[in-house]
Image (cartoon, rainbow, N blue to C red):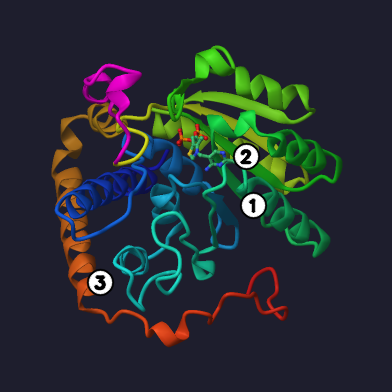
Amino acid sequence: VSRDLRLHLFRTMVLIRRLELKLEELFRDGTLTGSFHSSIGQEACAAGVCAALRPDDVVTSTHRGHGHAVAKGVPLEALLGELFGRVSGASRARGGSMHLHHRASGFLGENAIVAGNMPWAAGAAWARRRLSSDSIAVCFIGDGAAGQGLFYETLRLAHLWKAPCLFVCENNGFAHSMTVEEAFGKPGAIADTARALGIEAEFVDGRDVSKVNETSATLIETCRDGHPAFLECAVFRVRPHSLSDPDYRYRSREAGSEWLEENDPIGRLRRELGRAWTHDLDAIEREVNGAIDEAVKQARSQPRPDPGTALDDVYADPELSVDG
Ligand SMILES: Cc1ncc(C[n+]2csc(CCOP(=O)(O)OP(=O)(O)O)c2C)c(N)n1
């Protein structure tokens, strides 16, 4: 892994972490309303996979998708504008936290229906194949998606129709309060299921950003050769399911913070790189903090959309091409 790639992986993870921390602050003080699903602890998965993609590849995501959006290159201004409900938002204030879309970055969007983004991604991948493009689609899902009928239908059809789609399952231990062990068994069991459906599948330690990057790069080659592939990443849901989730009812109050203290993917990369990198990594952290503060300021300064435009952009323009 080159020096530039390591710095890029570090920066993406720090950007996701700092963004999620800033959002927590803004929701807690009432500046932002509604709820959000934090991806703290899962940064290595978004960063590692997206760093192996090309700009013309596309990504779909879930209700827990800020990290995927940032890693695919959605500008902070568009993301924060959306959360602040401003005209500068990625979905022009129609989407919010769970419905970010940014076609210019190849971010086809989040979907709050568990597994609902799977046919989106497989369809986008299949369209690419039909148009003889070697770009691919990536579909981020949680472990809960494997409990949905869509999971099996989509994987089977993607296999039969050779859709160049990489499905990335972030196994964070829980589907809300249901533990993965109870629903599916040991980590790796979901990758086994995909394999049983005929799909090349790997299972990796989602705390190790270099490993995630390396493994996804190999699977992406499989996709570019015209097949679907599947990656299960073992991560952990550090925060409650959402801001309003009483998680102490089904796990200890300290479960998340204890895990983070011992397993933090950002801390792991820092330790792995060693003291010689400290200066560069500290500079990245400062730059990222500045970029987030600047984007928050910019979002606050933007106007809210005119209520009269509420129905604009509700229906897709049939003239859109797969890349447009
Ligand atoms: C089809 C459907 N069923 C139920 C829900 C309610 N729901 C929202 S998130 C969630 C848990 C999802 O767990 P997982 O897929 O593992 O993702 P995670 O939240 O752990 O990232 C549930 C049950 C939903 N949004 N969609």
Name the mark nearer the viewer: 3 or 2. Answer: 3
Residue 79 image offset from top left, x and y in percent: 36, 63
Query: Is label 2 in contact with label 1 (beta carbons under 8 Å)?
Result: no
At a point 27% along the width and 47% down the height, the residue shown is 20
Residue 214 image offset from top left, x and y in percent: 51, 35
Residue 319 image offset from top left, x and y in percent: 72, 81
Tag 2 secondary structure: strand
**Sequence-first tag of 1 and 3:** 1
Asked if the stretch drawn in magenta spans residue 126, the answer is no
**Disc sitting over residue 299 in the figure:** 3
Q: How far separated are the C-alphas under marks 1 and 3?
A: 30 Å
Above-or-below relation of 248 to 28: above
Q: How far separated are the C-alphas under marks 2 and 1?
A: 9 Å
Q: Which residue is mark 1?
A: 137
**At label 2, which amino acid type do we have?**
Phe
Asked if the stretch drawn in magenta spans residue 258, the answer is yes
Above-or-below relation of 193 to 129: above
Crowding at mark 3 (Cα within 10 Å: few <14, some 14-19, many 20+): many
Tag 1 secondary structure: strand
Tag 3 secondary structure: helix
